[in-house]
């Protein structure tokens, strides 16, 4: 173990939340287990870290994915940009503590930015703003503050994740288009299949009324759906309202 690694922030956090960070050497050993490394380094393989901490496992996996893509697309910056975003889109995390959550998001984006900047420099180019904005969007959306066991956020709302499904992805695809679909964590456990593009819409709560009370008129909640979009433009969150 590296003597500079911090595995415990405070005894209080250990007592209250059982927070102990995994040493980097252990992370490396776990993600490179035979049969596992080959799978999780694929850009479209979904990985969920239910106790993400500051992102040690997710950052490790992202670094491996980016390294493989850099070799695979060593002469094609556009394909690297598209597939590196796909590699981010399939990484998910849940973290209970806000400071860890923020650090996890920052660590993931810095990992992507630094690698992308170095790779683009080989083509005498700078990182494209739309690619970086899309990377931020994917990371912020996929890393959620909440309680995995309760499957709720800190405000007791359902944890909601977005699936970024590639459309007609092939070995020769250069520009990836995706369709975003939102699921609650509970729906994922129940293997619910929603219409592609579905936006999670909370159902307004109703209260038990007395015999002579009248139910208040509930507001009409608009329903939206996401539209197919280039993965390099997901930060625009393109969607349309469904008219029934």
Image (tube, rainbow, N blue to C red):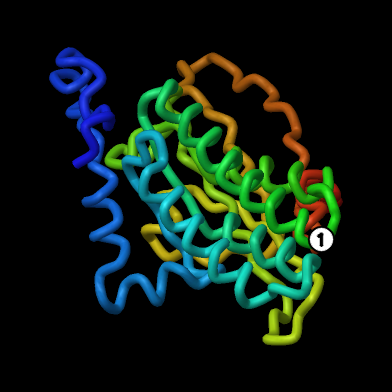
From the viewer's perspective, tell me whether residue 178 is left or right of residue 216.
right
From the viewer's perspective, tell me whether residue 63 is left or right of residue 19.
right
- Residue at 54% in and 46% down: 142
Q: Where residue 208 sits in the image (x, y, percent)?
A: 45, 23
Q: Where residue 23 sits in the image (x, y, percent)?
A: 23, 42
Residue 68 vertical position relative to residue 125 in the rendered view, above or below: below
Residue 189 vertical position relative to residue 43 in the rendered view, above or below: above
Which of 50/11 is in front? 11
Q: Where residue 108 sits in the image (x, y, percent)?
A: 53, 43
- Residue at 48% in and 20% down: 209
Name the residue that disc number 1 marks. Answer: 229
From the viewer's perspective, tell me whether residue 25 is left or right of residue 122.
left
Total marks placed: 1
Q: Where residue 100 sits in the image (x, y, percent)?
A: 40, 27
Structural crowding at the residue carrying mark 1, measured as other residues with C-alpha within 10 Å and reported as few (<14), some (14–19) or many (≥20)? many
- Residue at 61% in and 73% down: 71
Q: Quadrant of the N terminus?
A: top left
> Given the current orientation, which residue lies at the most extreme bottom position?
171
- Residue at 31% in and 37% down: 150
Residue 64 vertical position relative to residue 223 in the rendered view, above or below: below
Which of 130/116 is in front? 116
Which of 171/67 is in front? 67
* Numbered disc 1: secondary structure: strand
């Amino acid at each position: 173990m590296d003597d500079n690694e911090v595995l415990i922030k405070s005894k209080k956090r250990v007592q209250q939340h059982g927070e102990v960070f995994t040493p980097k050497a252990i992370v490396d050993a776990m993600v490179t287990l035979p049969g596992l490394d080959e799978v999780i380094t694929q850009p479209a393989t979904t990985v969920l870290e239910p106790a993400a901490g500051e992102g040690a496992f997710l950052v490790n996996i992202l670094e491996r994915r980016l390294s493989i893509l850099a070799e695979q697309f060593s002469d094609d910056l556009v394909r690297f940009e598209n597939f590196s975003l796909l590699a981010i889109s399939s990484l998910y995390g849940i973290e209970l503590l806000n400071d860890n959550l923020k650090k996890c998001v920052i660590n993931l984006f810095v990992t992507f930015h630094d690698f992308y900047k170095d790779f683009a420099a080989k083509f005498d180019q700078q990182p494209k703003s739309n690619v970086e904005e899309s990377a931020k969007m994917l990371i912020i959306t996929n890393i959620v503050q909440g309680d995995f066991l309760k499957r709720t956020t800190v405000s007791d709302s359902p944890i909601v994740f977005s699936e970024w499904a590639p459309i007609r992805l092939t070995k020769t695809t250069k520009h990836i288009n995706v369709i975003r679909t939102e699921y609650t964590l509970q729906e994922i456990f129940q293997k619910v299949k929603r219409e592609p593009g579905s936006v999670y819409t909370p159902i307004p709560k109703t209260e038990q009324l007395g015999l002579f009370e009248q139910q208040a008129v509930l507001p009409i909640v608009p329903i939206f759906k996401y539209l197919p979009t280039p993965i390099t433009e997901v930060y625009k969150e393109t969607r349309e309202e469904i008219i029934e």
